[in-house]
Amino acid sequence: MLFKSQQLLPFALACLLLSTQAMAKSDYQALSDSFKQEFHKQLKKNGVPGGAFVIIEDDKILKMSSYGKRKKGGTLNINSNTVFRLASVSKTFAGTLATMLVHEKKFSWEDSLIRYMPEFKLADSSATKEINLGHVIGQSTGLMPNSYDNILNANGKLKKIIPQFSKLTPMCSPGVCYSYQNIAFSFIQPVIEQQTGSSYANLVEKRIFSPLKMNTASIGMDAFLASKNRASPHIKTRSGFKKVKVKPNYYQVEPAAGVNASITDISKWLIANLGNNPKVLSPQLLQDIKEPGVRTRKELRRREWRTHLNDAHYGKGWRVYDFEGEELVYHAGWVAGYVAEIAYSPRLKIGMAMLLNGESRVIAELGSEFWSKVITQEKRLASKTKTAK
């Protein structure tokens, strides 16, 4: 609302403002219709086997659409309930669950990691003690980025990877620099399980999936393969997209990359993050998870986004962008055969997400262009309202 007391305005001016608000809703619908056309066009142009997207305004779905096949050359279409791997978008659930438990005093962000993982060691024993749970969930451990992901990529087992950390010396003190992790991020799992007596997967189901009625969402490879309506993974080759087998490697790090969900599930996740399910995601929790932490300078150089970003930070399982002057809460994911992207504007109450079953940078192009149009439209409407005043 752009004014404090509509009752004090002249009748004609009030009508003009109401007309502008109605036009905003109409324009967001028009933007959503246009995005559907562009989404289908670009996926077809880039040969992506299939995908789905959703655009949310506050508590309503403006547009949800699917494209293509569950597997290349197959006959089964992707629909709104087709399950994809979310890859690193899984971190948004981990950050949220961990924040819930901090609010409930199950543990504290200031708790040292080795209090719960005494087997975790770095080359420098004093540095080992300095890493706390806030650093883990906020991607500011100071460790070399993507530590030992190469071993995970080769399907090395987690129990053999953890001892390897004893060879590492941090590149900066914890909390000082951005240091994106998958394995170390997932160290929040044993903390959660020790302090609740429940498995991580069961707790996410109980605290998030079930109350939000995310009926096709799950965690883990077995659950994914048990989904009859699932999208197969495809990698890009010189001759186009090729179907591959689902890899188990990143399912070992459930908080970082273990969630599976459909675009219908993601619509419910976005609606809740826009503040429409306070019994599950409280206003205080939503504020905490997007509190900017360490600055993520690398994000400012992203090819498709760099012309739009003024600043970027990591929150708690979410990225926080200054996108052309507007706060945008965001995360993307990429794991063999799948890409995903989710973002929302807390102030504008707009959210958008995409899921693809083929590795393609087109998802970043579509996402950055969508948000640029949203912000451009918002500025235009704000200018009209200011003129009306």
Image (tube, helix red, strand yellow):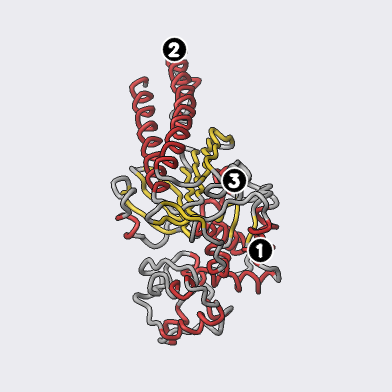
Which callout, 2 or 3, points at the residue further toward the start of the chain?
A: 2
Q: Position of residue 82 (x, y in %)?
A: 61, 47
Q: Viewer-nearest of labels 1 and 2?
A: 1
Q: Position of residue 351 (x, y in %)?
A: 50, 41
In three-dimensional space, the C-alpha distance between marks 2 and 3, rounded to whole angstroms, equals 37 Å
- Above or below, 208 relative to 294: above
* Residue positioned 48% across, 60% down in the render: 335
Residue 202 visible, this angle: yes
Which callout, 3 or 1, points at the residue further toward the start of the chain?
A: 1
* Residue positioned 39% across, 32% down in the render: 378
Mark 1: which amino acid?
Asp
In three-dimensional space, the C-alpha distance between marks 1 and 2, rounded to whole angstroms, equals 62 Å
Quarter holding the C terminus is: top left
Q: Viewer-nearest of labels 2 and 3?
A: 3
In three-dimensional space, the C-alpha distance between marks 3 and 1, rounded to whole angstroms, equals 27 Å
Q: How many marks?
A: 3
Question: What residue sits right under mark 2 in the picture?
Answer: 12
Q: Which mark is residue 222?
A: 1
Q: Secondary structure at mark 1?
A: helix
- Above or below, 325 relative to 334: above
Which callout, 1 or 2, points at the residue further toward the start of the chain?
A: 2
Between 131 and 301, the residue placed more toward the observer is: 301
For residue 253, side relative to residue 201 (left or right): left
Mark 2: which amino acid?
Ala
